[in-house]
Amino acid sequence: MMKTTAVVVGAGHAGLAMSRRLTERSIDHVVLERGEVANSWRTQRWPSLRLLTPNWQTRLPGHDYAGDDPAGFMPVADVVATLTRYARLVDAPVRTATAVRTVRAVPQGFEIQANDDLLRAKTVVVATGACNLPAIPGIADALPPSVTTTTPLTYRDPGQLPDGGVLVVGASATGVQLADQIHRSGRPVTLSAGEHVRLPRTYRGRDIFWWLEATGLLAERYDEIDDLTRARHLPSPQLTGTSEATMTDLNALAALGIRIVGRLGRITDGMAQFSGSLANTCALADLKMNRFLNRADEWATASGLDDELPPPHRFPPTHVDPHSPLQLDLRSGEITTVLWATGFRPDHSWLDIPVRDRTGHLRHDGGVVTGVPGLYVLGMPVLRTRASTYIHGAGTDSEALADHLNSFLSSRRR
Amino acid sequence: MTITDSPVVNGVNVEALLGAREALSAAPEAAEFTWRASCTWRNGTHSRSTVTGFTGLGAEQQHRVTYEFDVDHPECFASEDNGATPVEFVLVGLVGCLTAGVAAVAQFRGIQLRSVTATIEGQMNVLGILGADPDIRNGFENVTVRFTIDSDASRDDLEALVAQAQKRSAVFDIVTSPTKVLVELT
């Protein structure tokens, strides 16, 4: 049986960043990867997807963006190439095609079954990502069988969908991007929007992620956030990785001819029923966007930047069609596909350790798994800061957790 | 957000509500409530409903007193008008819930309220309930609530207050989202 000090599960950006931190600390480790480096990006993302964060922000420990388009947004293929290069750069001890079947707690550490091999490690870092499975609501069971369903994990391009109307459920970044793309393919889209996060791509001449970072919002720590559960479950902002459009918000989608309806509440006898609360959902999103823009303007003034930036302005409120339908007959043939852009959840089913709360979420304190010394999780939304949701957040997160892991090992040796 | 110098007193015990949120998150079975009413037909369209007990916090609970509500239709519907119509009770429930939410959220956000009034209207074409036009639904076509709030808070803060009150309102959710309803004969 192989023995090592640390096992990192997953060779995505988080696992590779952690590998680099462990190497810096001379901690003997191995990175187990079910497929190849950046496996989810290779196999579970639609090819035209681009990162929401600009290239200059897509940095990893010891590796800053060095290409010729810092303001651009990396397509999936470039993310794969970047992570593959990074794995070589940091000389990460990755074992590819090695699927972790179970992890058990044993005296002095953990026993990991990977493929048919058993490994022993003093510590385990879970870096398998937050988006392994689509979070499909239970009401999906009531869909008429005539309707095709798909999820962002299996969706590739509009051409794979049957002709006809598409109901996209969910108005996160994924929902608005796919609604836009599918509608442009000639399949009329209806977008069901619940609570959502509206932000402009650019504001006062700068990318919104520049503002989110500069104002300190992304650096807000998990233990300083009022409502952490809410922060961790917030839908991704309605942005697209392109500087061509200022907005891919509901107004922009409606202008394309996409029909916006409220949150999908139920499906009864083939009828999809939508909430009548759309006006308030949109009002809340507008208020929150403006609250952030106020903060951005106050920060710009306090930082003496008002002279070099274009003047502040506000975006038109979200227009809500007073005649947007409250129900839609899914048996009429008008809608041939339902796309569940209702979020994702991690798959920790291979962790044979009681670490989940009653809602199935891994219990952890900033990535230090509760009640299981030596077990860590990385690469989850708002893990340690609001930046944890994005690739560059793994930099500071992996540093803090590697320090914790190192202290844990020292305490074991004493 | 408005921070006033003197302590904000809207009569809402925010500490108790936040304490309940924490305690109930830790003991989720106590968070399961069942609300009840019972109804007795009197005559014609007149009925009387009473509300006295409910289940919650893992036990049977009682209101301070039993509340009674007469429900009837107006005289123009050839009824005796012994009470508000059922649809008006829905409006009362919605506006009461939103107003409670406005006060609670204001307290939480440190906004002192001097007065809050609201009007609520529900538009309905009665050809629906009369079965005269299958294209017209029975229920409200639209519900409009208008709040008038006297407070030193900014217009933006008050709009955020009203929006948050909707987001956290049980009756707003009941009215805007579909609910499974089972009616049985015992």
Image (cartoon, helix red, strand yellow):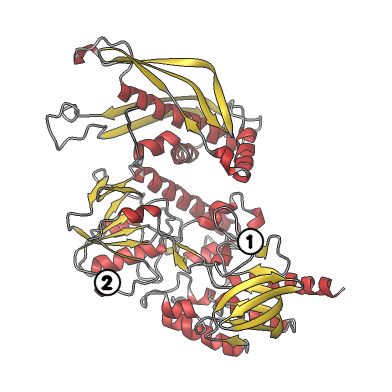
- Residue at the disc numbered 1: A355
**Mark 2 falls on what kind of element?**
helix
**Mark 1 falls on what kind of element?**
loop
In the rendered image, the quadrant that contains the C terminus of chain A is bottom right
Q: Where is residue B70 in the image (x, y as percent from the top left)?
A: 36, 14
Mark 1 — on which chain does it sit? A
The residue most toward the front is B186
- Foreground mark, 2 or 1? 1
Between A256 and A246, the one lying in front of the other is A256
In the picture shown, does residue B113 fall above or below A163?
above
Q: Position of residue A80 (x, y in %)?
A: 47, 83
Which mark is on residue A329?
A: none
Residue at image location 17% in from the left, 58% down from the top: A333
Q: Is B70 left, or right, of A71 in this rendering?
A: left
- Residue at the disc numbered 2: A158
Residue at image location 54% in from the left, 52% down from the top: A230
Q: Where is residue B122 in the image (x, y as percent from the top left)?
A: 29, 29
Looking at the picture, which amino acid does disc 2 mark? Answer: Pro
* Comes first in the chain, label 2 or label 1: 2
Q: Distance between the residues labelled 2 and 1?
A: 39 Å
Q: Where is residue A52 in the image (x, y as percent from the top left)?
A: 45, 69
In the rendered image, the quadrant that contains the N terminus of chain A is bottom right
The residue most toward the left is B132
